[in-house]
Image (cartoon, rainbow, N blue to C red):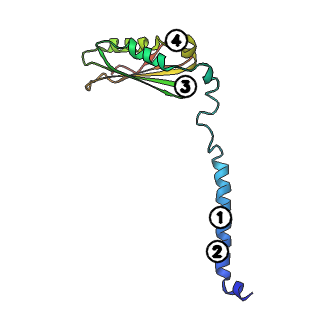
Amino acid sequence: MNFIKRNKGTIIAIAIFLVLVVALFQLKIIFFPNTGKAIYGNRLEGIENVQISNETYDKVKKSLSEDAVSKVTTKLSGKIVKIFITVNNDVSLETAKSYGDKSLEPFSAEQKKYYDFEIYVEKKEESPQFPIIGYKHHSKEKISWTKDR
């Protein structure tokens, strides 16, 4: 009993600290309830039915393997297929945009209706009109391009 009387302040401080820790933990659960769940939620439902194979990505690279295209890389992020195209410095804006349409040809109609596509076209050296970015939403038929600068 003497121990409790002598250390009353310390015991109260420890009790208050424990109550605060429990309260903060409860507040975290209330304000951040989705911690640990998938980033995309259920938006990727059915993706296993419309998967894109490596052969399709290789066909994209092969279809763009012209003299004016120096590098093509692809990346899949959730439901977004990103295609990065580097063209030579003598390529015009309209020609570069045509590479966007050409890069989508290897994909099936089912894949085009499921995935969104982002096409990044840049030149080897800096240019006032480049880079340009094209977007194709899964519900649209055409690519919409960033404004010409």
Q: Amino acid at mark 2?
A: Ala
Q: Residue at x 40, y 17 (%)?
A: 61
Q: Tag 3: residue type?
A: Lys
Disc assigned to residue 79: 3
**Viewed as shown, does residue 132 lie left or right of 106?**
left
Residue at the farthest bottom position: 2
- Real-space CA distance between mark 2 and mark 3, rounded to the nearest whole angstrom: 52 Å
Residue occupied by mark 4: 141
Furthest residue toward right: 1
Q: In the image, what residue occupies the spot 55% across and 11% down? A: 109
Check disc 2: other Cα within 10 Å, few if <14, some if 14-19, many if 20+: few
Image coordinates for residue 77, horizontal then vertical, percent? 51, 29
Residue assigned mark 1: 20
Q: CA distance from mark 3 to mark 4?
A: 17 Å
| Mark identifier at residue 66 | none
* Label whose residue precedes the other's in the sequence (2 or 3): 2
Image position, residue 11 (x, y; %):
67, 77
Asked whether residue 85 appears in the rendered view, the answer is no
The mark nearer the N terminus, 3 or 1, is 1
Which sits earlier in the primary sequence, circle 4 or circle 1?
Answer: 1
Real-space Cα separation, disc 4 to disc 1, in angstroms: 56 Å
